Amino acid sequence: MTISIAHLGPAGTYAETAAVAFSHKLSQLGQKSILCPYPSIAQTLWAVSKGEVNLAVVPVENSIEGSVTITLDTLWQLDILEIQTALVLPISHGLISLASNFEEIKTVYSHPQALAQCQSWLEKFLPQVQQIPANSTTEALEHLETDRSAAAIASQRAAELYQLPILAYPINDYPDNCTRFWVLKQGSTEIENSALKLIINRINKPENLVFTSLGFTVPANVPGALVQPLQVFAKREINMSRIESRPTKLSLGDYLFFIDIEANSNHNYVKAAIEELKTYTKILKIFGSYTIMA
């Protein structure tokens, strides 16, 4: 069996780099895989939910800009995906252009996350340029060959793939810029090949720290509505490593919450916490337990 892995394309995106890293890990464990690019993060996740591919690799959190909201919103909407593992990728942006100098550049294209991660640099060196969002850092490169006054923010690897010059590198505002990616599959069905189950288990080594990601809504927007769910974990000394609120899109001021805990949902004390959590939440979704891939 060859495992198909969806990612945000085209070739040269950071999501593809993460997918390549995961594919390499699979090959080390004797599993063949192919990469399948999609034009957006949402379509990447939808591809898994519809069974077009076996797995998806998507960004979920950046160390500078925080959560990738389209990933969280789509994951909540689909209600069928399960996190298998995670990996962290260092992110270094370059300014790519056919212009001979900064003065020639009038527009800069890139994914909104990449633009945000380079704001201070852009304000210092290109304060007058127009910043235009693109679906991906690689898609931004499409504008360069027809417009010498255009530049794109993308990876060094993307510049090499498309044989384009880098005017400045690295340009991200913080040197320790990194992004966490999730690898997901359909949660409602078994992985087709039992060998792949064993491989995923080998990637999620038991000696590594295990995270469980979940999301929930509360019955009403009243004082203490969020305190009670969080106390479920606090009183059991379960560390919560992340919390994020997102609008439900149903009404103004109505929110849902995503949290990561440092615990395995298969352990009895975590099962007890989740059972109690159900009494304080309106909708509760467990997205999976996993480790960070080394």
Image (cartoon, rainbow, N blue to C red):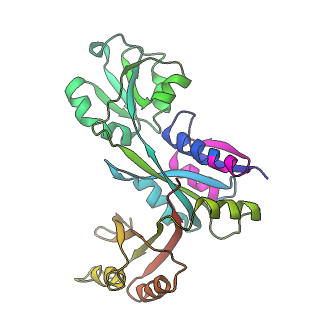
Residue placed most toward the observer, 145 or 169:
169
Residue 245, x across and y down, in percent: 33, 66
Residue 252, x across and y down, in percent: 29, 67
Residue placed most toward the observer, 13 or 270:
270
Q: Is residue 188 left or right of residue 103?
A: right
Q: Is residue 202 left or right of residue 193?
A: left
Residue placed most toward the observer, 63 or 42:
63
Q: Is residue 250 above or below residue 58?
A: below
Which residue occupies 55% across, 40% down? 16
Q: Is residue 2 above or below residue 120?
A: below
Q: Verify whether residue 42 appears in magenta.
A: yes
Q: Verify whether residue 125 appears in magenta.
A: no
Which residue occupies 38% across, 22% down? 151
Residue placed most toward the observer, 224 or 3:
3
Residue 239, x across and y down, in percent: 35, 73
- Report the magenta residues as a range: 25-49
Instruction: Confirm whether residue 20 shows in the render.
Output: yes
Residue 291, x across and y down, in percent: 51, 62
